[in-house]
Amino acid sequence: MSLGLLLTLALAVDDPRIDLVKAQLENQPAQALEQTSALIQDQPELNQDLGLDYLQGHLLELEGQGAQAGQAFARTLAGASVLAPYGRMRLAIAQERQRHPEVAAGLVATLLQGEIPRPLLPRAVALLRHTLARGGDCRLLQGINAREFPVPQRRQLTLAEALCAFRTEDKDRGQRMLIELLEEETSDDTAREAVRWVAMLPNSTSDPRITLLIGMTLHQHREFQHSVPYLEMSLMSRERGGPALRTAEDLEARYAMIRGHFWLNRFDLAAQEFGNLAERTNIPRERSRALFQRGRSLELVGRWADASKSFQRAFNAEPSGRWADAALFAAMRLEWRTNNESAALQLYELLSSKSQWRPMAGRAALFLAVSDLVQGRADRAQPWLDLARLSGGSDTVEVSYWEGRRHELEDDPAAAVESYLVALKSDLAHPLAQAAGRRMTQPKLAAAARSKGLELLRGSVRRTLASQRIDDLYAALLLLGENTAEGRQASKRLREELEEDRSAGPYLRMETVPVESWPIWQAPLRQPEDKLLALGLLQEGAPAVRRHFPRSDLNLAFTGSQLLARAGEHSHSLRIAEILAQGAPSRLPQQLYPQELQELLYPNAYREFLDSQSTRFQFETALLQAIIREESRFNPDAVSGAAARGLTQFVMPTARKLAFNIGLGPISFRDLYKPTTAITLGAAYLDDLLQEFGGAQHPAIAAYNAGVPQAHLWRNYCFSDEPEEFYTKVGYAETRGYLRKVTASYYWYQRIYDLGEAGLTVSPSQEVGQLSSARNPPR
C-alpha cells in the first residue's frame, strides 16, 4: 500500500461513516440501520453535518418501515441540511405511491421553486408532471421559473402548463404553447406528447403549416403510418382551396412523405414517387438524391436493371455531388451481381478516378475481390485487395482475412496463417478474426499454424526488446492455444513479461481501494451528492463518483466503476471502464485484463430476467446482452436520434406490433424505458429475426439495425452462404460497424461468463470453433 493511502487511512479511521458504508456494501442494511440510529441518539451533533437522518430514512424504507422512514426524511427538512431537497423528493415519491398526487405535487413544486440540485431536476420535473396529470393543482406551476432550467426540463414544464391550460378552458393559449414546442424541437419525448394534442385541435387538418408540423414530428418519431396522411394533407392544401406551402416546405414534405412509404416497405410506390420528385426539381443535388433513393427502392423489390439505371442517372445528375460515389458503387454492385462484368468494371474504373472517392472505391474493390474468392477464383483478387488496404475504406482485419483466403486458394498455408494471424492480433473478437481462427483449425492450416507458433515461441527468447518478446509470445499463444504444453508456456511467459512492463503491469495488478482508504473522507463535501456518496447511498451519490474516484488514479477509477455498477448505474460504470481500457497499452491483450474489469466492460445486468426471456425464445442470453450493450450501453433512459428508446432501442410502431404479438397489450413510449418491457420486446424481436433468416446470426443482427428488407438485399449480394461474405457486403458503414461491435460483445460475453476463468488466454482457433456449434441452437 502506498504512503499516501496509509496517511489517508490514518486520518480517516475515526470517521463513523466508514463502518456504515461497509455494512451497506456487505448487504447488511439492518446492521447499518442499527449503527445509524445509535449515532443519531449518542452523537446528535454529527447528524446535521453528516446527514444521518436521511440515511436512516433510506434504511428504514429498505426494511419496510415506510411511516418511520417518512418521519426521518421530514427531519432533513429542518435546519440548513444540504440533503433537504433529497428528503423532500423522497417524501413526494412516498405521497405519490400512497395515491396523494395533490400532496406530492405540492412537495415537488416547492422543491422546484428553490435551489434544486441538478441531478435531482429531471426526476422532480417528471414527478410534477405525473402528479399534475393525476389531480395536482395546476396553479403550482405559477411559482416555478422554468426559463432557468435546462432545455429538456423547460420543455416538459411548458407542456405541463399547456395541458393545464386545456383543463382550465384556456384552449387558445394551450394551442399556442403546443405549437411553439413543436416549432422549437420535434425529436424529443415532449414533442411526441405534444403532437398527440395538436392533432386533436380543430384546425389541425385545415392549416397546411400545422399539418406539416404534425406530419414532420410523426415522421421524426418514425410513426410513418400516421405521418404520411398528414404530409399528404399539407401538400394538397392548394387543391382544396387553402394556402400553399412555400417551395422549400413543399420539397421537405414531399421527400418525407415518400420516405415514409419507403419505410413502410411500399417500395414500388416509393420508387414511383421518387421518380416524380426527380422530374419536379431542377436542383441537381435534389434530383440526384431523389434518383438515388429511387434506385434503392427498386433494388429492394428485385428490379435490379432498373435500379442500376436509376443509380447511374443519380450520378449523371450531379457527377461531383454528395451521392455520386455511392451511386457508382451501387450500380457497379448490381451489374457485377447480375454477371454484367464488363459494365461493372467500367463503373469501377470511373469510381477509382477521383481521389475523394477513394474510400468508396476501396469498398467496391473489396466487393469484387470477395465475390471472386468465395467462388474459388484468386487470379485477379490481389490488386483489388491492395486498393482496399490502401483506401481507408476497410479495416485491417477485414483485408487480412480475405488475403488469407486468397493464400488458401493458392495452396500456400504458411502465407494464409500469416494473414490470419494479422487479423487475430489486430482485433481478437472481430467477426472475421473469429472466422480466421476457425479456418486455422482445418488440418492443412493447423500444421502451419503450429509450426509458426513454435517458431515465434523459440524466437522470443532471442529478442532483446521487451516489446518484441511480448508481441512474439502473444502471437505464439494465439497460434498454439493453452490446450498445449507450448501454449501454456507462452501464456506464462507472456504474463511475466507484461507484469514487468511499466505500462501494462499496473493493469494486471489493478485492485479495489478499501473503503477506509477512499480520499472522500478527507475531501470537503460541498455538494449533496458528495454527502450521499459518503453515506454509502451509491445511486443518489453517483454524480459525485467522478470527483472522488478520478480517472487519473487507476485503482480509484476502477473502484468508482465498481461502485456505479453496484448501484445499477451500468451505463456510467461502463463508460469509466472503457476509459480505463482505452488507457491500457495495446500490447496488453484484452483477455488478460483482470476478471473484474472485464465484467465492468461487459455488464451482467438484468441477467436473471435476460435468462428467462432467452429461455422463452430459445437463444443464448449472451447474444441479447451484446445487443443491449451496443444499442444503449445499458442505459434504460437512452433515446436515439431516430426516436428509438430504452435498453433495446425500439421505435413505437415496432414496439406496438411486437407487444400485440406476444400479448403485452397496449403500450406507450414511457413503457419502453422500463427494463423488463424493453428486454421482453428485444427478445421477441431477436427471435423473429433469427427465424426470418433461418437462425443465421449475421443477417439477424444486421436487420436489428437496418431492417429486414435491407438485410435480405445484402444477402442477395452474396455468392455464398458464408457469414464472412455477408459481413463484408453489408452496404452501410454504420450497420457494418454495428455488426462488428455486437459480434465482438457476444464473443466476450461468452468468454467472460460462460467459458471458465477469464484472464486465461485460449487460442481463438479452438475457442471460436467450439462456440460455432452453439451459435444456432434448436429453435
Image: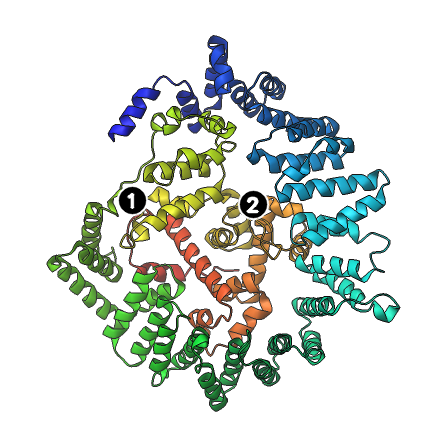
Given residues 363 and 147, the one toward you in this image is 147
Q: Residue at x 51, y 27 (%)?
A: 528
| Of the image marks 1 and 2, the number of the one nearer the N terminus | 1
Circle 2 SS class: loop
Marker count (numbered): 2
Given residues 457 and 387, the one toward you in this image is 387
- Judged from this view, the residue extending furthest toward the left is 462
Q: Is residue 303 left or right of residue 487?
A: right
Residue identifier under label 1? 507
Q: Residue at x 59, y 26 (%)?
A: 85
Which quadrant would residue 100 be assigned to in this image? top right
Place of residue 258 in the rendered image (x, y in percent of width and height, measured from the top left): 70, 70
Q: Is residue 456 left or right of residue 657?
A: left
> What's the amino acid at mark 1?
Tyr
**Residue 684 visible in the picture:** yes
Quadrant in which the N terminus appears: top left
Q: Residue at x 70, y 40 (%)?
A: 157
Q: Is residue 518 above or below residue 40?
A: below
Place of residue 467 in the rendered image (x, y in percent of width and height, measured from the top left): 20, 56
> What's the amino acid at mark 2?
Pro
Residue identifier under label 2? 636
Place of residue 572 in the rendered image (x, y in percent of width and height, measured from the top left): 47, 42
Q: Is residue 299 above or below residue 8?
A: below
Which quadrant would residue 278 be assigned to in this image? bottom right
- Judged from this view, the residue extending furthest toward the right is 241
